[in-house]
Image (cartoon, grey):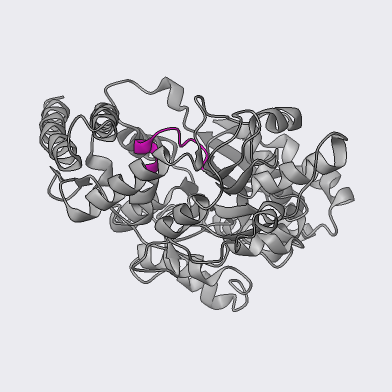
């Protein structure tokens, strides 16, 4: 746990010099309040939220409770460790993913925010309504938490390449099938060091990587978390695997041997073919927009090109929503906290228009739930789709030990199907049967711990 008590008032004074207005009243400053917030890192917390919060609420003694995943015992799952951590540390404000949020709502561990929101009629004004609705849906019709940011991807496209080859650019609400067909319209021949590609998807190197992305978009799961049955021998899965194999064998996709995890601007220029102007479309988050802007300003040998964005791929059964959108930075108040007022002040502030106005000056992979302060019009594609609710209730019951072995099995069988050693139906059937045996084994070990 990281503690920042005596420093909080000094931080308040210093930051008030740089932030318009200092709102801590003399009455509040006279009586310090305590607040403990859960987060993944202490320095990250103060950089992301704490320093700005203290500049307005200098009467708060702010502590950070950090769960260090590197110290977790191997026999304990993260879910179990998180439950124990909250029970031991008793943070006033919890920092949760969507599945953790839904689970703790069901367990009655979170305080409803409805009374505070009803009292503050303009509190949610300007926040992305689809994200608020998503959190309400997870909360059974009530809000138990708010998320100042979210993560999403959009489809970037090189407008110059589309113009050069006389191809109509992509548009919003396209499916994977439509995007892959569009990518295949670009020539797939030429020198490997100079040729262009139709599409690039980060961390997609093989057909099974692509199949996993497509399946997620369409809401397909290899394991039914309620019945714990592995089922892939269906028409839907066959279509996904067939689409992925055909796309990766077409030559239209950029499939790097090793994934690029980012780095300096020069690293991006050296490793990212979309940045080099050699890929027509790329599925990526908002961070690459900052990279392109930085390259234009700082590297004289960078050849800038015209680009734009449209929404990422959608499920053909629901083109207005997305399962790829992650609302995973949810702040919620622990039920029974003795510091309810300070906890609400924190949740309210980090989701406020004032906070967003400051943070919108620079954006990265995570975007603000409030978009009014962004001046970049190409960010709109990230906000157009609604997040789709996923049944998180029992997904965490699937053992981690199974997932790794199952992914290896999937890769092996898909490779056989791609090489025509076995049929697609045989590959899917093998994954279903062998995968079920692996899951049963993992569940038995987990239950006997």
Q: Position of residue 14 (x, y in %)?
A: 85, 43
| Snapshot quadrant of residue 343 | bottom right
The residue closer to the viewer here, 206 or 61, is 206
> Is 219 included in the stretch rendered in magenta?
no
The residue closer to the viewer here, 130 or 67, is 130
Rendered position, 323 above or below 142: above
Q: Is residue 404 visible?
A: yes
Q: Residue at x 29, y 46 (%)?
A: 242
Q: Position of residue 302 (x, y in %)?
A: 81, 37
Q: Residue at x 82, y 57 (%)?
A: 22
Q: Position of residue 149 (x, y in %)?
A: 58, 54
**Screen quadrant of the C terminus:** top left
Q: Describe residue 195's horizontal placement relative to residue 298 as left or right.
A: left
- Residues in magenta, as a range: 201-211
Q: Position of residue 234 (x, y in %)?
A: 17, 52
**Screen quadrant of the N terminus:** top right
The residue closer to the viewer here, 231 or 54, is 231
Q: Residue at x 70, y 50 (%)?
A: 363
Q: Describe residue 357's horizontal placement relative to residue 67 as left or right.
A: right
Q: Residue at x 69, y 61 (%)?
A: 378
């Amino acid at each position: 746990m990281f503690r920042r008590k005596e420093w909080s008032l000094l931080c308040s004074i210093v930051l008030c010099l740089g932030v318009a207005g200092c709102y801590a009243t003399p009455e509040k400053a006279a009586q310090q309040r305590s607040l403990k917030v859960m987060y993944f890192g202490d320095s990250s917390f103060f950089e992301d939220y704490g320093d700005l919060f203290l500049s307005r609420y200098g009467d708060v003694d702010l502590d950070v409770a950090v769960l260090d995943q590197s110290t977790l015992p191997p026999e304990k799952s993260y879910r179990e460790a998180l439950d124990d951590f909250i029970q031991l540390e008793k943070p006033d404000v919890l920092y949760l993913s969507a599945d953790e949020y839904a689970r703790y709502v069901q367990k009655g561990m979170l305080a409803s925010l409805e009374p505070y929101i009803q009292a503050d009629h303009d509190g949610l004004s300007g926040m992305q309504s689809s994200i608020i609705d998503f959190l309400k849906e997870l909360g059974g019709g009530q809000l138990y938490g708010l998320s100042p940011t979210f993560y999403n991807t959009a489809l970037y496209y090189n407008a110059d390449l589309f113009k050069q080859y006389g191809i109509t650019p992509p548009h919003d609400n396209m499916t994977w099938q439509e995007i892959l067909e569009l990518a295949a319209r670009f020539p797939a021949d030429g020198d490997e060091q100079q040729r262009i590609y139709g599409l690039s998807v980060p961390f997609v190197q093989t057909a099974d990587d692509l199949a996993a992305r497509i399946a997620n978009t369409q809401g397909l799961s290899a394991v039914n978390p309620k019945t714990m049955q592995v089922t892939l021998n269906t028409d839907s899965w066959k279509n996904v695997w067939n689409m992925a194999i055909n796309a990766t064998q077409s030559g239209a996709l950029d499939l790097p041997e090793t994934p690029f995890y980012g780095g300096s601007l020069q690293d991006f220029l050296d490793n990212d073919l979309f940045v080099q102007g050699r890929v027509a479309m790329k599925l990526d988050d908002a961070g690459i927009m900052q990279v392109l802007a930085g390259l234009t300003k700082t590297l004289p040998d960078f050849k800038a090109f015209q680009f734009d964005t449209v929404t990422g791929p959608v499920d053909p059964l629901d083109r207005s929503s997305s399962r790829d959108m992650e609302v995973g930075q949810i702040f919620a108040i622990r039920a029974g906290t003795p510091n309810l007022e300070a906890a609400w002040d924190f949740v309210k502030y980090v989701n406020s228009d004032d906070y967003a106005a400051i943070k919108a000056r620079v954006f990265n992979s995570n975007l603000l739930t409030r978009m009014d302060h962004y001046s970049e019009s190409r960010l709109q594609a990230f906000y157009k789709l609604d997040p789709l609710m996923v049944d998180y209730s029992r997904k965490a019951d699937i053992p981690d030990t199974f997932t790794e072995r199952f992914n290896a099995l999937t890769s092996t069988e898909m490779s056989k199907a791609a090489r025509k050693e076995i049929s697609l139906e045989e590959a899917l059937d093998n994954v279903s049967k062998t995968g079920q045996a692996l899951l049963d084994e993992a569940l038995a070990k987990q239950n006997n711990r």
